[in-house]
Image (cartoon, rainbow, N blue to C red):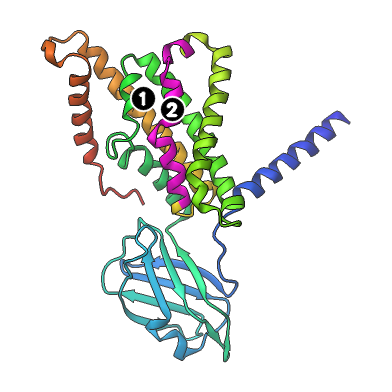
Amino acid sequence: MNISKRNYLLSAVLVVIGIFLMAGCATEHRFVKKTAFKEANQIVIEFAGPVDEAWARNASNYTVYEKPDPDIKLKIQGVALSADRKTVTLTFTDALKQSQPHVLTANHIASEGKTLGTAILSVKKVYLGYLFSILIGAMIINNFVFTKYLGLCVFFGTSQKKSTAVGMGITFTIVIVVSAMMSWFLYQFVLRPYRLDFLQIVVFIGLVSLSVQAVDTILRKVNPLLFKAFGVYLVLVIANCIIIAVPLILADNEYNAFESLMLALGAGLGFLIALFLMSSVRERLELARVPPTYRGLPIAFVVAGLFALAFLGFSGMSIF
């Protein structure tokens, strides 16, 4: 009987988690079956039924832009319609940056003489590849420390020893994942529905503070030595630019739960990588013959600048 109850409880938890993760995903139009990239400069729209030819071939009925740049509309060169009138192929003047998600608006879809409303559609590459690209992008390609220069206070303060650096990196990753997912949930189900978007910074800072306080209390009991090694820098996580930037980015880009998780995890692991690399070099620098005027923070800034130049080589790289 206990085993049966345990199985029911496990199934209920899995269902709740599944609903939570799938909630907030962009809803597509009921008449549109699929959108996808084709070739280097084409987007294919597959409809559930035949559309009116006059509507389908009119390029002015479509608006396409990259999700991060909504003000830059992409120029459509031509529109092709399949024989069964269920598939529309848009050809663009320039090659599409397929590593970025695109937003396609089909205005006043017409089928069999009826207007089916306007569809706002997202066009992405293979979804698992897209999730992986968000993770690698936040972790390496667009590392928040070496490419955006965020979180430098905690970065320089806790990167003197490997043990402290790794501990802070793991703690930071846990805090940023928890706070980002809570921020996403509140943004999707409270702030947006009730038009309270203007409070997002205040709410996000409050959630980060709550997460850090929870980690502070747990770490004080579980690992007092690591807690003492962090010192004031654990509290400074609250004011870390990265931990505030991630919820703002996921809210601005309208990420769903999976995408938000990948962004937060990538940002945390990227910070861990930056701390580990920096602490490895700074431990070696303690034994090096560094001029007295450069010892301490000056040489640390020089090393950070060299790492930033190295990470600049990843800029523009596309995984999928």
Q: Residue at the location (39% across, 15% down)?
A: 164
Above or below for 219 versus 15? above
Whether residue 290 is visible, yes or no, is no
Q: Residue at the location (51% across, 53% down)?
A: 197
In the rendered structure, the answer to whether residue 3 lies left or right of residue 60 reads right
- Return the residue at label 1: 154
Which amino acid, mark 1?
Val
Q: Badges 1 and 2: C-beta atoms under 8 Å apart?
A: yes
In the rendered structure, the answer to whether residue 215 lies left or right of residue 44 reads right
Q: Assign a secondary structure to mark 2.
A: helix
Residue 204 is inside the magenta segment: no
Residue 245 is inside the magenta segment: yes
Which amino acid, mark 2?
Val
In the rendered image, the quadrant that contains the N terminus is: top right
Q: Position of residue 37 (x, y in %)?
A: 40, 66
Q: Assign a secondary structure to mark 1.
A: helix
Q: Position of residue 93 (x, y in %)?
A: 27, 74
Q: Quadrant of residue 13?
A: top right
Q: Categorize mark 2 by other alpha carbons within 10 Å: few (<14), some (14-19), many (20+).
A: many
